[in-house]
């Protein structure tokens, strides 16, 4: 699929993996809506990128927010891509805490809402808009890329809610691709391993000291630019559909995460 001259929406586009994705898509000739709750960062990024990007404050759980962000993308050109890479809450804690009290249902729901329900909300509303775009080669209209995590396969202790949410994103990939095949929309999921993002709140050197030894090769954390590079590869290779791709340096989480 050729993204040049088309538009895209990136939820969570104001920082980390999302920011790198926005920059990569703009460099490839796309117009991009930065959909995020981080207003200051999003506005600054849009201003830096000029006419190629706009910011829209977006809560992925609010239909009106997502629809308005998509409408901005449509106004910039035929929408062909949605990348759901927004963040949310932490892992949520253990099923039973050290004092014997259970994981709160409210916290579990918050995590699942942010990562799973929010992702599906973006998917369904973006699919509605992309389906109205004129088809390209092979009848392809566009692509939806979701972001899972390798925690969706082997979550560490204290990640039960996060693992459930990301496992849900993994689980709906093939079904969504089958659902949307009739309108020429592909669905792919990226499952990152340990990537450098602002959420860690540590400098790169310190993060690599903690996580590098756990990664078979290369012995470091992943870089946002590498996630963004994979996004572009998925866009350009139209035979990739209904699959989850791990990008993790061959790491497999052990029960306990490394501590810094």
Image: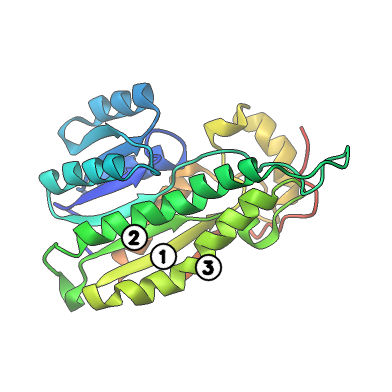
Label placed on residue 29: none
Circle 2 residue:
144
Label 3 to label 1, Cα distance in Å?
11 Å
**What is the basis of the colouring in this image?**
rainbow
Label 2 to label 3, Cα distance in Å?
15 Å
Viewer-nearest of labels 3 and 1? Answer: 3
The mark that comes first in sequence, 2 or 1, is: 2
Vertical relation: 31 (above or below) 173: above
Q: Position of residue 18 (x, y in %)?
A: 41, 41
Answer left or right for 141 relative to 247.
left
Quadrant of the drawing holding the N terminus: bottom left
Residue drawn at the location 24% of the way across and 25% of the way down: 47
Quadrant of the drawing holding the C terminus: top right
Viewer-nearest of labels 2 and 3? Answer: 3
Q: Are marks 2 and 1 in contact (CB under 8 Å)?
A: yes
Q: Position of residue 48 (x, y in %)?
A: 26, 26
Q: Residues within 10 Å of mark 2 (few under 14, many from 20)?
A: many
Circle 1 residue:
188
Circle 3 residue:
171
Residue 250 seen from this side: yes
The mark that comes first in sequence, 3 or 1, is: 3
Q: Position of residue 173 (x, y in %)?
A: 45, 68
- Tell me where residue 24 sits by quadrant: top left
Mark 2 secondary-structure assignment: strand
Residue drawn at the location 28% of the way across and 55% of the way down: 125
Residue drawn at the location 40% of the way across and 52% of the way down: 229
- Tell me where residue 239 sits by quadrant: bottom left
Label 2 to label 1, Cα distance in Å?
6 Å
Mark 1 secondary-structure assignment: strand
Toward the viewer: 227 or 33? Answer: 33
């Amino acid at each position: 699929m050729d993204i040049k001259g088309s538009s895209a929406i990136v939820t969570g586009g104001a920082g980390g993996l999302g920011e790198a994705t926005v920059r990569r898509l703009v460099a490839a000739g796309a117009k991009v809506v930065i959909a995020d709750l981080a207003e200051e960062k999003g506005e600054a990024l849009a201003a830096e990128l000029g006419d190629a990007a706009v910011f829209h404050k977006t809560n992925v759980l609010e239909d009106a927010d997502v629809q308005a962000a998509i409408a901005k993308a449509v106004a910039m050109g035929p929408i062909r891509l949605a990348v759901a890479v927004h963040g949310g809450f932490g892992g949520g804690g253990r099923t039973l805490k050290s004092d014997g009290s259970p994981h709160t249902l409210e916290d579990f729901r918050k995590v699942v809402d942010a990562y799973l329900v929010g992702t599906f909300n973006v998917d369904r509303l973006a699919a509605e808009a992309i389906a109205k775009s004129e088809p390209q080669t092979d009848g392809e209209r566009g692509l939806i890329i979701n972001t899972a995590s390798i925690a969706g396969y082997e979550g560490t202790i204290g990640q039960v809610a996060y693992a459930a949410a990301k496992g849900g994103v993994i689980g709906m990939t093939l079904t969504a691709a089958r659902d949307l095949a009739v309108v020429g929309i592909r669905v792919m999921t990226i499952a990152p391993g340990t990537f450098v993002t602002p959420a860690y709140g540590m400098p790169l050197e310190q993060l690599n000291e903690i996580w590098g030894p756990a990664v078979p090769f290369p012995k470091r954390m992943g870089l946002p630019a590498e996630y963004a590079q994979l996004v572009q590869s998925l866009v350009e290779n139209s035979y990739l559909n209904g699959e989850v791709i791990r990008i993790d340096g061959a790491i497999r989480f052990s029960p306990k995460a490394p501590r810094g």
